[in-house]
Amino acid sequence: MSRNAIAKSASITAALAIAGTALLGVTPANAATNRSQIVAAAHGQLGNGCSSGYDGIPCNLNWCAAFATWAWGQGGVDVSKLGWTVTTFVNYGDNNGTWHDPGSGYVPQPGDAMIFGGSGYPTKASGGAHVGIVERVNADSTITEIGGNQSGSVTEVTGTADSIEHNLEGSNYNFLGYVSPVGAAPAIPAGFNVELWGFNSGQTLSRTVNLTAHPTQSGVINWLDYVIDGQNHTYGGGSFTANNNAVLAKNSIGLYGWTKESDPLETAQATGGGVQMILDDDGVVWAKSSIGLYGWTKESDAGVKAIAVGSDGTQMIIDSTGRALAKNGIGLYGWTQESDPGVTAISTNGGTQMIIDSTGRVLAKNSIGLYGWTQESDPGVKAIAVGSDGTQMIIDSAGRVLAKNSIGLYGWTQESDPGVKAIAVGSDGTQMIIDSADRVLAKNSIGLYGWTQESDPGVKAISTNAGVQMILNNDGTVYAKNGIGLYNWTKETDALIKAIAVGSDGTQMILGQ
């Protein structure tokens, strides 16, 4: 798969301190994002109430994320993958490598987003309850935050991150983290190792470092070639990749045995019915029907926000305007518009399609075409999943799991207490959840409770299909098994994996090293 990037070049002269390896500071030229413009735009709205000018949001909805999206856009940030929910900022940070946990040592910068926990959305995994913007970091290390929908208007709050959290959302909740806008700082690290040959440790010299950067459409530099020259001699060269999100796949449980399938520039993956889909860092969708290196078919233009594929090969995407599109064959374009803008989540399996609309309602149908959706819930739903046997699962506004096996208004069966963070359902009806303690629970029938604990705490993602269960631990290791029960997981990877998926044919996909 090609990177579809226009090469840009820059030359700098740097003093390289050689101590085994040298540390070279790199700053991309012409970064598109301007932090001061983000802050100025937000500050200029102080005292104002909601406006449809904030990313087009209806003012009967919570509008903090729409305000933050608008402010970032004023600073030149590509906001095509952001929207009206705090979750979009959490996903943006994870997908772009710009999420910063509290206590990580990260020093917030003006223009960063601040993610706060709150009622119904207390954790990062639940998506967060409120988002504001760092206006400034003060001399005493306190932060001045500015945000929309704070007591109904745009206001400032000054304090530590925790005290701002407690001021806005109450003392029972925790500050969750910062998200930096892409392009505001180097997408590559502040330094990377450059090996030079033929010099003694500690020796200092000046040489020209020729950098060739390969930006995405949104200007992100995450792939860099470098050559160090001087006095008619090349001292070193190579390549550095900041985003190592390569896709790997296999079709059996066991340690390792993965086949690399893509370059390291992907942000999402999905598999079902023998179809594999990936979303690259430009928001372009690619698909294929077999495991192997490359062989991807481009399916869309840039800007796609989410992908899903079912056991019957139905593919769904959320496009750059927030509309759901669908089709059932691999190829360039050929998508059918299915909804108006505002869709925040999609799922498909066994011919059933589900979406969450802009108000948090679940809609469903079982054929591709414009509209024809059946409302299934009231607003406030946080997550959806559907199995190829027709089992539908949702996480409601209270964090409870509800399930049913037919399309229609209501008719949900409560399956859990509040606090569930993630859901998955497979082609055989296996249901999985991550509970409030980050443990995996599973069962294979609809009803209140009846869950079997399958893991200790520490799981952050789940997937199931064709009897195969996959989990992703907090350290990025993947485990799998093919039966419900406590433990008996098989380790499949080392650490640092970022996402998992398993298809109805047993194809496993991971995103990471």
Image: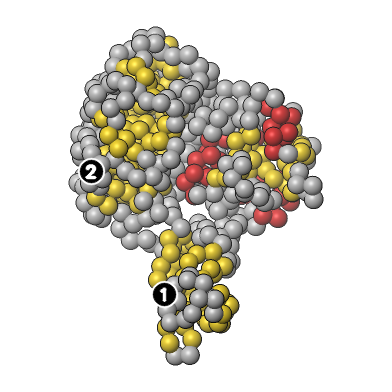
Identify the element where label 2 is drawn: strand
Which residue does the numbered mark 1 point to in the structure image?
237
- Residue under the point 28% across and 27% down: 488
Q: Nearer the viewer, residue 122 or 135?
A: 122
Regarding residue 48, the answer to whether it shows in the image is no
Question: In the shown orientation, is residue 512 left or right of residue 86?
Answer: left
- Residue under the point 74% across and 44% down: 143
- Residue under the point 31% across and 54% down: 262
| Residue 234 place in picture, x, y as percent | 42, 83
- Residue under the point 70% across and 25% down: 170
Question: In the shown orientation, is residue 333 left or right of residue 74?
Answer: left
Which residue does the numbered mark 2 point to in the structure image?
250
Q: The residue under label 1 is which amino acid type?
A: Gly
Q: Nearer the viewer, residue 461 or 214?
A: 461
| Residue 99 place in picture, x, y as percent | 55, 45
Identify the element where label 1 is drawn: strand
Q: Earlier in the sequence, mark 1 or mark 2?
A: 1
